[in-house]
Amino acid sequence: MKKLNTPIRIFVGLLFIFSGLIKANDPHGLSYKMQEFFEVWGFDFLNPLSLFSSLGMNVLEVFAGIAIIVNWQTKKITWLLFILILFFTFLTGYALFSGKIKTCGCFGDCLPLTPAMSFTKDIILGVLIVILLATNSGKANKGIFGKIVLYTVTLGTAAFQWYVLSYLPIVDCLPFKKGNDIVEQMKVPVGAIPDSTSIEFMYTKNGKEVRFDQVNFPTDFDSTYVYVDRKDKVVKKGNGLVAKIVDFNLTTKSGTDTTAALFSNSKQYVLVFAKEMNGAESWKNEFQTIYKKLQAQNIDVILVTPEAERAASIFGNINIVTSDATVIKTAARVIPTYFLMQHAVIKEKVAAPCIDKLFTTINSK
């Protein structure tokens, strides 16, 4: 059994490093997944801590993975991995058995796993880590090279996360990535089978609760039935295939849906996504400079935000449309993010520090 220690140790370490790095590419993605768990559990007050927790968790996974491979503080690190995998197994098990969380976010948006796949992965990892605990010789690598690798990679992961928080993820795995056609992403995949549902009504009659669906409506239904609630009950599960982008629309201040009108425009235009106006004063001057440069090139600029009135008070008389905050935070991880559009196709997607790329794409047409 001890002969298995080294290959298992390397495998477990590599998997933790991979998990940490792939999520470090998009720490906002993990923070939003944390918020999803918080909201289901009624812990919404923890949402402000989600990004900090995401950053720390990603660094911790990479640190632990490197440490176990270079055999640094092996016993302590193995126990740390055991605690982490117990925590992850709880989360993936909750997602699987409660049905309230569709994906656990174990490998981010770049490698989505079903709850069943995630739970199985964690069970296998848990068994492997128990084997490591049972076969740990207690010997630790005290060489300087291992420490250099450990600290360098850990600090590099932290620096990498700082970079993507300012410049967008290096690898964009979202449906709003450069080159995608938003209309195509909104189409339901061929072969998709939706859930079959029925409506269950809840009433009280003579002080007793009565439940029925739309097929089995009571023949004596009258004013003595007092409405309590209604729920959509899944009768038969579909195959889970859904459109990659849902609920995307752009609405003017007057309430008109202008999405189709914009997508039918053959002229290039720029959508600027900002999921909130908190801190907008800090990027107001930069935005106005970019706005004027785009206007000088006859490029229409539309600010997309759920806070249209507040945006108008900050930026004045510019073209502003509203969209759902959840859609915006999926489309754009950095506030603000600039999308160069032609019809519904994303020609370029950049954060403000890389705005030159957007102008290069405009001028290369």
Image (spheres, rainbow, N blue to C red):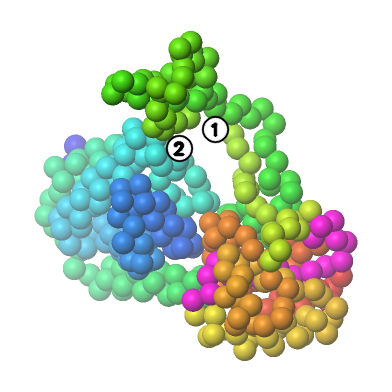
Residue at point 43%, 18% (across, down): 212
Given the current orientation, which residue lies at the most extreme left position?
138
Q: Quadrant of residue 272?
A: bottom right
Disc 1 packing (10 Å; few <14; some 14–19; many ≥20): few
- Residue 256 horizontal side relative to residue 146, left or right: right
Q: CA distance from mark 1 to mark 2?
A: 10 Å
- Residue 259 horizontal side relative to residue 126, left or right: right
Q: Amino acid at mark 1?
A: Gly
Quarter of the C terminus within the rendering: bottom right
Q: Which residue is mark 2?
A: 114
Mark 1 touching mark 2, by CB under 8 A?
A: yes
Residue at point 65%, 58% (across, down): 177
Residue at point 39%, 72% (across, down): 158
169 is higher (above) or lower (below) than 287: above
* SS at circle 2: loop
| Disc nearest the viewer among 1 and 2 | 1
Residues shaded magenta: 261-278
Quarter of the N terminus within the rendering: top left
Q: Quadrant of residue 54?
A: bottom left
Residue 192's spot in the image, x, y percent? 63, 30
Q: Amino acid at mark 2?
A: Thr
* SS at circle 1: loop
